Amino acid sequence: MEARCIEIRCGNAFHRLSYEDLCSSDVQSLLDECYALGVEVLCLCNPDRPVPMHLRRVRIRPPTYTLVTNPYGIHHPDCPRFRQSRHPSAYQKTCDPRAVETTPNRTEEWLPHRRIFVPTLDQLNDAQREAATHKDGPCMVVAAAGSGKTAMLIARIKYLIDQGVDPRRILACTFTRKAAQEMTERLLTATGDMGKDVTIGTIHSVAYRMVAPKMGDGWRVVSEPSWMIERVLE
């Protein structure tokens, strides 16, 4: 298998990298530019079935990026990703017994070796723990990318459930479906079946679920809402 199996595409141009190259500061500078351009990233561990990936920023200063496999992406068992997949400064293998590692259901399937780690309240820092255990009134948290917001939210939801709050009365909204899916996976890892009763979704999907029962039959979603905006402004 070719070592330089990462292909970054931007228009008609492309660049090949290896997973080991992610450790280079020069390559990290290149990835910083690629992140701003929204390039296409593929892993060619199996040339007949390239695996789509995307860049994720894990640190702001200095800008540090790692490669994340898109949902349902399946790597070859011998893919170098399993040996070196993250920048060393962002990667730390956990030995916590609460971490859950998924394994293939059938040996003939190619499934990525994935480890989902959900920190407990004791493993959060002081600021995260303060937000996760906040009790009375609203609480606004301002935090940068990669600072552990999702981990704090999952720890807070688990804390509320442990305090006796009905999971059906907990709502978590986010902006993207990918973030909602990631939160759901982490929550199920932390709480088990009780997490299934928590409502997690994008702002738009949650709003749709609230409005739909009130509208009854005979209504539809319009693709051109300018008339509604003009009516509201009047």
Image (tube, rainbow, N blue to C red):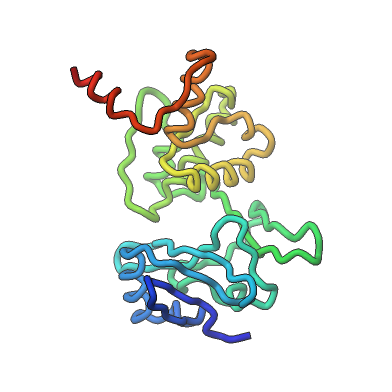
Image position of 55 (left or right of 44): left
Residue 91 placed where, x, y %? 50, 68
Q: Report the residue that reaches farthest toward the left.
A: 234
The front one of 185 and 165 is: 185
Rendered residue at 46%/46% (across/down): 150
Q: Quadrant of the C terminus?
A: top left
In this rendering, the answer to whether 94 lies above or below 135 is below
Rendered residue at 37%/71% (across/down): 11
Q: Name the image quarter holding residue 181.
A: top right
Residue 119 placed where, x, y %? 54, 49
Image position of 40 (left or right of 1): left
Residue 135 placed where, x, y %? 42, 27
The front one of 190 and 17 is: 17
Rendered residue at 41%/28% (across/down): 222
Q: Quadrant of the N terminus?
A: bottom right
The front one of 53 and 136 is: 53
Rendered residue at 47%/69% (across/down): 41
Q: Name the image quarter holding residue 225.
A: top left
Q: How many marks?
A: 0
Residue 37 placed where, x, y %? 32, 65
In this rendering, the answer to whether 204 lies above or below 49 is above
